[in-house]
Amino acid sequence: MHLTNRIFDELQPGETACLRRLITADDLYVFAAASGNYNPMHLPGEDGDGDGVPDGLAPAMFVASLVSAVLGTLLPGPGTLYRTQSLQFHQHAREGDELESRLTVAAKHDDGSVTMAIRVTRPADGALILSGEALVSAPRVRFARDDIEIPGLIVQRHRHFEALLERARPLPPMRTAVVAPEDDRSLSGALLAWREGLITPILIGDKALIAAAAGEGSLAGIEIIDEPDHLKAAARACALVHEGRADAVMKGHLHTDQLLRPMVDRQTGLRVGNRRLTHVFVMDVPGMAHPIMVTDAAINIAPDLRTKVDIVQNAIDLAISLGSQQPLVGVLSAVETVNPDIQSSVDAALLSKMADRGQITGGLVEGPLAMDNAVDLAAARTKGLRCEVAGRANILVAPGIDAGNMLAKQLSYISHAESAGLVLGARVPVILNSRSDSAMSRLASCAVAALHHARLSGAKP
């Protein structure tokens, strides 16, 4: 970034400079974090409390900071020091407004100070947002540099999950068999999704433990099936699906293998034909323009090619349910070229060709891809990869459970992603949460399941 200034001797009355800035939701979150001003009026959203005051208003001093940006970078520029400032606020600005901050040299003074006239307007309708004057000390020494670099910021909020929740809320609540919700986290997750209107829970487990987990909370109006044995509780959930009483199954406080074992039973389970059960993490990664899906990170330990076909197809089907018009599948390996000594690279190439021949449908599949050139366009271009998936993948297919689990947890614990977990390939979505999952993660898992169920059942989200 190039920065230069106008020293005091060069400034002339009438000289002007302006800067335009689109106010984004991230701007307001950054301002709240940096200033400590958490006034909810100033955060993005609607008038959720019904008090007639719209949310998403830009704080007055955030708008005033656009004045500082002109003074410090354009006119007079680097080296400018504030002395005094007088501002009058005429209208409010809000998220989505583009503002123009224009400063004009009004007068120069013998002591080296300069009076700057201030106007901040909204060009879309010509509205005057702010006016006033600033008295500044103009720089006396020339400053001109081309190597100015300010660290970028990534706002840690989960906009993709918020959007999925908004899409899922109008849907009819899913009748959900919750297996062994016998601790506070698993039960509270189900109850939270119930209060949000995403599910109608049927609690299956030890009734006494469920009541103890509820504590002072009320379970009135919720069906509870008393079954202390976890395997039998999971089998009862499968039976509810077959009886048409459950649209989804949700994991509570039991081991994943206990939940899934009854589901793979040939007679009473939930598998659809010969399709394998596979797991998908839907990850909301701060800074990414779209959700990232990681598969399989929880069920299939060392999948062969036949299993990987189901892993890819299940993930594509889910991505379409979540609104992706053309899912882009990156099949991961350590390299982006086929190496016969690296089985994952061979499998990736075969999956890509199978998609070309219509054996996998609904999305574009490319592999092998290394992690960098799967999600970063610049890395893909550096490696000479110019296919549509490279650098843009929104589904990442891991070579095995080790790599998939490490990738998902790295995104969660280092990149601050939230994750929703779903098992696919069954007659109904199976919501698979970790015991350490946050409330947002549990809600998002239910929202993902609701959207997938809606597509499978023909409902319109």
Image (cartoon, rainbow, N blue to C red):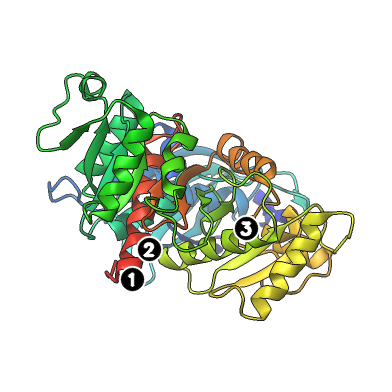
Amino acid type at image mark 2: Thr
Q: Nearer the viewer, residue 1 or 121?
A: 1
Amino acid type at image mark 1: Gly
Give the side of residue 104 with respect to residue 441, left or right: right
Amino acid type at image mark 3: Thr
Q: Quick check: 56 above or below 40?
A: below
Residue highlighted by disc 3: 307
Among all residues in the image, which is located at the extreme front? Answer: 267
Callout 2: few (<14), some (14-19), or many (20+) C-alpha neighbours within 10 Å? Answer: many
Q: Quick check: 316 above or below 359?
A: above
Q: Nearer the viewer, residue 288 or 244?
A: 244
Q: Which mark is residue 126?
A: 1
The nearer-to-camera label among 3 and 1 is 3
Q: Nearer the viewer, residue 206 or 214?
A: 206
**Residue at image point 60% right, 73% down:** 360
Give the side of residue 356 with respect to residue 333, left or right: left
Image coords of residue 229 (percent x, y)? 33, 27
Label 1 secondary element: loop
**Residue at image point 76% right, 52% down:** 144
Check contact, mark 2 vs mark 1: CB within 8 A: yes
